[in-house]
Amino acid sequence: MSKGKKRFIILFLLSLVALILVTHQHGRRSSMLFKVLSYPYDVLNKLTSNVILTVHEAIDTFDENKRLKKELTAALLEKQRYAEMFQENKRLKELLSLKEHRHNYVTTAKVIARGYDRLLNTMILDKGKDSGIKKDMAVITTKGLVGKIYSVKDNFSEVLLLRDPNFSVAVRLQTSRHEGVISGTGHKYSALKYIPPEETIEKGETAVTSGLDGIFPPGLPVGVVTSVTKEGIEFFQDIKITPFQTDAKIEEVVILSK
């Protein structure tokens, strides 16, 4: 090979290497310039992505919290419903136990409303003539006497409560065996009437129906003596009776025939 050709080949190779080096150096500079120029965009893009992700996570957390609250509310309502059913079942079992011990048991009824007449202390039951209920039948709970049937329709009836001033029942005190009549006062307590001042009545004595009025069966618990006053009276002692059954808490009752 001639010297001219060798020189040409060497020059060509050197030019090719130089071109490669220049191209590589320019690429590195372009890459660095691109990185510098794109850095703010990359930061903004990353920040935006983080914000969007955070917002989505917050929305998901809010929805999850809302769902959990809804489930918790439903669970609490269900728990309350079961608790109410349990209490109702317990009360009904106690009332039905009276059926086994009372030959004059008529039916069990629910209280659905308070009386409409402002001059009377009454409540409304969900049963009436169709269930065998009649006027003047005794109304009781497991605690004691509630009142008597005041009026009756086919599917509901009205009870005159023990505390009404128009209500009265013949009773006997279990310890002293004294007899009298309990009348409503319109208040939480009732009055035991017709006990002479010479008779000894003690606080805490239990009053039960005597059956002498021809309306109420004998032996029904009515209330307990809570106050006895002899001073300043002329004919009869002033005796207060607190009923065993508070009518404000009655939900179901038992009806007894005469």
Image (cartoon, rainbow, N blue to C red):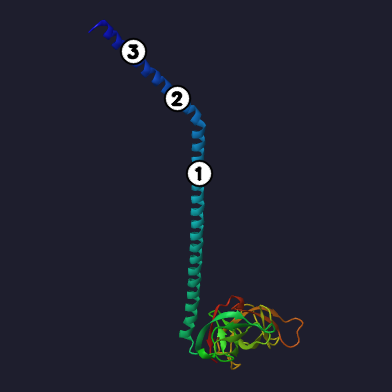
Answer left or right for 138 relative to 12: right
Q: In the image, what residue occupies the spot 39% across and 20% down?
A: 23
Residue flagged by tag 1: what amino acid is it?
Ile
Mark pair 1, 2: CA separation:
32 Å
In the image, which is nearer the foreground, mark 1 or mark 2? 2
Q: Secondary structure at mark 3?
A: helix
Where residue 52 is drawn, which disc sits there?
Answer: 1
Depth check: give the residue in front, 184 or 225: 184
Whole-percent x and y of residue 4? 28, 7
Answer whether labels 2 and 3 touch (C-beta < 8 Å). no
Mark sitting earlier along the chain (1/2): 2
Q: Secondary structure at mark 2?
A: helix
In the image, which is nearer the foreground, mark 1 or mark 3? 3
Where residue 30 is drawn, which disc sits there?
Answer: 2
Whole-percent x and y of residue 100? 45, 85
Answer whether labels 1 and 2 touch (C-beta < 8 Å). no
Locate residue 116: give its quadrant: bottom right
Residue flagged by tag 3: what amino acid is it?
Leu
Q: Secondary structure at mark 1?
A: helix
Residue tagged 3: 14
Mark sitting earlier along the chain (1/3): 3
